[in-house]
Image (spheres, grey):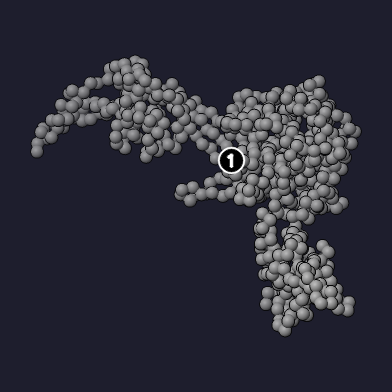
Amino acid sequence: MSADSTNKPLLEIVKNSKKPTSKTGNTGGSGGNGSSKTQKFGEYVIKNGAFHQVKTVKASPDGSSGIIEFPLCDFVCSIKEEVTQDDGLTDATFLRIEGRRASGALLPLVDVPAKSFYSSQGNWANEHWGTLPFIYPGAAKKDNLRACIHLFSQLNGDVPRRTVFKFTGWRKIDGTPYYLTGSGAITESGLVDGVEVDLGAGHMSRYQLPAPLTGEQLKIAVADTLALLDVCPSKPHIGVALLAAVARAPLGETHPTDFAIWMHGLTGSKKSAIAAIALAFYGNFTARSFPGNWSDSVNDAEAKSHQAKDAIFVMDDFKPSVSQTEAAKLHAMAERLIRNTGNQAGRGRRDSTMQAKAAPYNRSMMLVTAEDLPRGQSLLGRLLILELTRADVDNSVLTRLQQAAQAGSLAGLMSAYLQWLAPRLDQLKKDFPKNIETFRNAALRDGLASSHPRAPEIYANLAAGAETFLEFLEDTGMMTSEQSNVLLSTVETELQQAFSEQGAYQIDQDETERFLQLLRAAFSSGNAHIACRLNQGPPPSRPFAWGWRGDAVDMVGDKIFKPQGDCIGWHCDTTGTTPAEVWLQQDTAFKVVQQFARSQGDSFLISASSLWRRMHEKGLIVKTEPDIKNNRPRLAIKRMVAGRNVRVMILAADLIESG
């Protein structure tokens, strides 16, 4: 085939094509209203209200050329803004795009993920505008449309860019500490509105702080705030602990907050009203507008507690009483959130490509209101538990605090505190952990807060937070040095009282103590029994306490006792100087306790081997024998029972019988 015959169709296309009136610059409007005006930029042109690609082609072997305009779509659009959303884990970038069809119909403003816009496989226009826009088929056309929009959007300069923060708390911007809040940010110079914070819908949007208070207004706010110490006259440690928590919360940037406060009591004890006062220091909150509650999903609760960085975050109304199934779910949620807080780590996840995803974790000072306690001694060790009764709260003091909260006085004081903290934040990152260590060492030395190994650390965090707040009051002239010292001494004393009450909760949740309590209850309810080692009958003393019942008498008038439930061990009476012992069959005893707990709607989740080790560590197992192979004591030893050797765990009979 000759060259002439090969190129003839192309020559006809070039001759019939219409050249743009100008190769550079604008020659009309945007073309988004159906007009016939054109606008050329780079290799693209707007014609008849739609984007076209302009392509120069060789028309013949002699080197002459022509221009072809390929339509890419039937609309015109531009990127109005590039928005980066920073949630403290990952940055997500969106392009705000607005357009107009060739017919003149408006294509509304949409937020398109940047990765979707720049993806060669994506179809962002139809995903966001549905069937309104039409894009001509072909991968090359999609690539050119993306480049065309990008170039068109930059005709008048770079696309405006801004960052939207999705969390509260401290963040350095251009080297300066900013405390982010829904109304902007608090800095050394006060409230600035040049920072955008979007906490989403719902009550999270209430995290908004006003401008810092000064002068006489600040004095009034301080007086109102100190009234919190008297909100529970019979239990002053409750008000002290809440004030210390309010002061400690914004210091999470200097040292992680790896504990929570659990406030529990019967309905009507005003625990939610008290919690709302603490929360009101950080925004426009009431007892009917908490940011979190226990009906939230666990993922939502984790995400919101991550958002509420360096602030009080309330989870309201822990009440696992709907059904056993729902109660188990609620306790599981509590365990996950508390461990998330204590470990300062979220639940790991993977995306579709098995790459690790950043997981949210609690960065707030979490305050829980509840009618029950979470299960497990280790969980309680991560909490300061405050118990309220209906008679504890002084209503006149509570009313005063609620009025101050409604007037924004408490939030204004917090803004002033944050303004004071801002220029000191870098130094506090060095000093505050040392202050915590000083308080902790003193607590350990004096035997304070000894209910759990974590208790001295929690005590030290709250005491150090209160000390920092009192330094602020001194520096701003709201309190003298003498008054500050007296108040700090009161804070320390009351916090010590709060932690002295923790021991009772720890004992209630101690797995070894629960095992013994459930074992005694199983005997009393007739779910198990202990037999005499010698004759397999009832133990000689107090058979009822060992699971036997006497409902008949023999011919001489003595009671006839019958065993109840499974036999889980044997009673060995006192011999010489050796006190009475109980020889437990470990597996049978553990099974009975688990079943008995389950029948009560409770659970006993610790493994048998862990339970026996803890009992041995506490010195409850009377006798052991060496295990040469494993180089550790064997807790189940051989004993002769009814003519056969069995392995049993030996406990003092008095431990089980009398408790």
Q: In screen coordinates, is 79 left or right of 301?
A: left
Residue furthest to the bottom in view is 643
User: At numbered mark 1, what does the secondary structure look like: helix, strand or loop?
Assistant: helix
User: The C terminus appears in which quarter of the rendering?
Assistant: bottom right
Q: Is residue 413 visible in this depiction of the protein?
A: no
* Residue at point 85%, 42% (across, down): 494
**Residue 95 vertical position relative to residue 650 in the rendered view, above or below:** above
Residue 87 percent across, percent down from the top left: 57, 37
**Residue 105 relative to residue 526: left or right:** left
Residues 636 and 312: in front is: 636
Disc 1 marks which residue?
A: 300
In this view, 470 is above or below 330: above
Q: Quadrant of the N terminus?
A: top left
Does residue 346 appear to the left or right of 404 in the view shown?
A: left
Residue ID at (35%, 28%): 133
- Residue 410, relative to residue 301: is it above or below? above
Which residue is drawn at the image coordinates 69% and 58% (left, top)? 597
Residue 257 picture quarter: top right
Q: Position of residue 60 (x, y in %)?
A: 16, 30
The residue lying at 17 percent from left, 23 percent from top is 15
Q: Nearer the viewer, residue 6 or 416?
A: 416
